[in-house]
């Protein structure tokens, strides 16, 4: 992918695009992959970098959502488990199985969570990642050597998926580009255009060159996450808000707090939240919180009380109590939760995501989660084809391999997350040995990865390279 080439395509395009997608997070990028692989002429514009918003700030789990099972929402869990399986098939370089241990401190927890997680296994069916089982106290300690042992009775182990969210976003952008889509980061939609009462395109400002384009499209898709309502207001200033943003914070700790390969899952903290401590890229990610917020921003900041909550709860389940000085990094993301009953023509295709078509034909897709991005995209493009009067074409993403896919036994070590591209990065190093140099002694990231990000992954600045092409900034901010 090359930004100059993408920008010149946008500049020189004369006819209308079939599908214009606003937003380059999980939802928009998935929609671009779906639309372009059906053969529609697709353009995606993102105001900042791909996955700059919520999509780089998740807990990094590809999961059915044990929480939804607790709430009795079986259809949602089924859909997510199904998508979890599809994603592992199509992106094995980014998604892998992870054992989770639910530590039990009360007598009833072992049987209760044991049964619940066996139902989870059953629902996964042939897409199962491994059978759950009850663990003795000794087995629990063996799996989680740093688990708090006071009052510990045992545990329940189950399997879910883990991934690298921003890397998947970049690989989705590359997949869409390979399918013929045009994708431009640092390109912001500032207004929608109309012909009569119908949305006919958008005004796009290139944040790098200051160029402005008025682009025509048969259908415009609003996939802007927590910014959904600002784009809806460009269509109709009187449209009611449909998003209730909720902030979730994670802290990152050194691996010594959770050595080994298993994660901890606490299904119910005393205020009813789910808490995870997950090994990720050689560190431990602990999260998350759920704080309703009024204002949305691309740089949400963790609140003191959220950091405090995470430290207190981590200390409750770990022998070594983390202090503020142990926090290597903290990041906040905003959940684009959809308000119930907004009084409009809302087609709720699943409890988890919502597609809304305004009177003037603006298609908004909101809600959902990373795990179900493919299904959300399929539903969106089905509807977009109707709104835009496009020739009906079937979705093919269930078996579409994501850029980087490889099925070789070869392991590329710290470059494994690049999949098939890893060998090209290694070739870069062979040609230019100084690219083997590490960025910092505490990080395995080498210069070649930054060169690769700039040349092939449309990274435009240091932050793009350190926060989303590699994950240095999230792993150790200092
Ligand atoms: C704390 C937390 C933890 C989570 N953990 C998980 C998890 O473990 N597993 C899971 O499956 N899901 C998880 N999720 C959910 C998942 O991350 C989100 O559902 C998903 O990332 C939302 O993607 P999106 O594309 O809708 O929004 P975003 O990623 O926010 O993308 C929207 C994009 O639109 C762009 N945009 C906005 N306005 C404009 C404009 N005018 N012009 C151009 N571009 C614009 C923004 O810059 C942004 O990049 C988590 C969410 C949170 C908050």
Image (cartoon, rainbow, N blue to C red):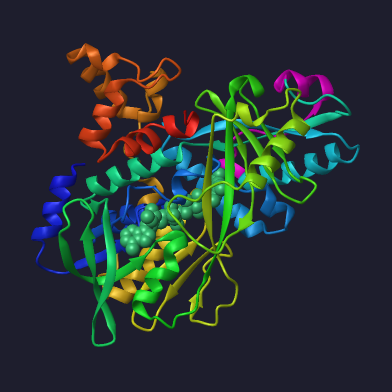
Q: Nearer the viewer, residue 236 or 410?
A: 236
The residue positioned 38% from the left and 31% from the top of the image is 470
Quarter occupied by residue 18: bottom left
Q: Position of residue 108 (x, y in %)?
A: 89, 41
The residue positioned 60% from the left and 53% from the top of the image is 78
Above or below, comparing residue 103 to residue 140 in the picture: below
Q: Position of residue 433 (x, y in %)?
A: 22, 11
The residue positioned 85% from the left and 28% from the top of the image is 152
Quarter occupied by residue 441: top left
Quarter occupied by residue 328: top right
Count of numbered circles on the image: 0
In the image, which residues are magenta? 125-145
Left or right: 313, with 165 as reference point: right
User: Residue pushed farthest bottom?
Assistant: 196
Above or below, comparing residue 70 to residue 438 in the picture: below
Magenta-colored stretch includes residue 473: no
Q: Nearer the viewer, residue 335 or 208?
A: 208
Q: The N terminus appears in which quarter of the rendering?
A: top left
Work out whether residue 27 can be spotted: no
Left or right: 80, with 177 as reference point: right
User: Residue pushed farthest right?
Assistant: 107
Q: Nearer the viewer, residue 158 or 225?
A: 225
Q: Position of residue 405 (x, y in %)?
A: 35, 34
Magenta-colored stretch includes residue 139: yes
The residue positioned 49% from the left and 30% from the top of the image is 475
Work out whether residue 428 can be spotted: yes
Left or right: 171, with 272 as reference point: left
Above or below, comparing residue 309 to residue 48 in the picture: above
Q: Position of residue 38 (x, y in %)?
A: 28, 58
């Amino acid at each position: 992918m090359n930004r100059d080439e993408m920008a010149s395509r946008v500049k020189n395009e004369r006819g209308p695009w079939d599908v214009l997608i606003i937003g380059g997070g999980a939802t928009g990028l998935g929609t671009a992959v779906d639309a372009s692989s059906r053969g529609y002429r697709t353009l995606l514009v993102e105001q900042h970098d791909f996955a700059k918003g919520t999509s780089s700030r998740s807990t990094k789990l590809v999961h059915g959502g044990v929480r939804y099972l607790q709430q009795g929402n079986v259809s949602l869990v089924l859909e997510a488990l199904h998508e979890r399986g599809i994603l592992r098939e199509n992106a094995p370089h980014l998604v892998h199985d992870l054992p989770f241990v639910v530590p039990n401190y009360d007598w009833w927890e072992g049987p209760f969570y044991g049964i619940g997680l066996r139902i989870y296994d059953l629902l996964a069916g042939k897409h199962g990642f491994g059978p759950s089982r009850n663990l003795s106290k000794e087995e629990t300690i063996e799996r989680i050597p740093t688990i708090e042992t006071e009052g510990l009775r045992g545990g329940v182990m189950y399997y879910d998926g883990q991934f690298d969210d921003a890397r998947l976003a970049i690989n989705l952008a590359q997949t869409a580009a390979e399918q013929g889509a045009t994708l431009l980061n640092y390109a912001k939609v500032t207004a929608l255009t109309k012909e009569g009462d119908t949305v006919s395109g958008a005004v796009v400002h290139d944040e790098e060159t200051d160029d402005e384009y008025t682009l025509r499209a048969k259908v415009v898709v609003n996939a802007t996450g927590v910014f959904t309502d600002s784009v809806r207001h460009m269509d109709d200033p009187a449209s009611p808000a449909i998003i209730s943003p909720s902030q979730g914070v994670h802290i990152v700790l050194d691996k010594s707090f959770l050595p080994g390969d298993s994660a901890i899952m606490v299904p119910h903290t005393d205020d009813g939240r789910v808490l995870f401590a997950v090994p990720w890229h050689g560190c431990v990610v602990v999260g998350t919180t759920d704080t309703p917020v009024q204002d949305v921003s691309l740089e949400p900041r963790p609140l003191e009380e959220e950091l405090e909550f995470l430290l207190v709860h981590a200390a409750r389940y770990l022998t070594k109590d983390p202090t503020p000085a142990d926090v290597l990094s903290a990041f906040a993301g905003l959940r684009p939760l959809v308000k119930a009953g907004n009084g409009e023509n809302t087609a709720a295709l699943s409890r988890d995501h919502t597609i809304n078509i305004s009177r003037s034909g603006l298609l908004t897709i909101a809600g959902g989660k990373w795990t179900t991005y493919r299904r959300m995209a399929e539903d969106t493009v089905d509807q977009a084809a109707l709104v835009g009067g496009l020739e009906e074409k079937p979705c093919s993403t269930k078996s579409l391999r994501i850029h980087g896919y490889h099925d070789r036994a070869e392991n590329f070590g710290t470059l494994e997350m690049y999949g098939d591209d890893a060998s090209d990065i290694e070739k870069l190093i062979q040609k230019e040995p100084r690219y083997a140099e590490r960025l910092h002694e505490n990080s395995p990231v080498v210069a070649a990865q930054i060169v690769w990000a700039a040349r092939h992954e449309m990274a435009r600045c240091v932050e793009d390279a350190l926060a989303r092409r590699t994950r240095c900034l999230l792993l150790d901010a200092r």
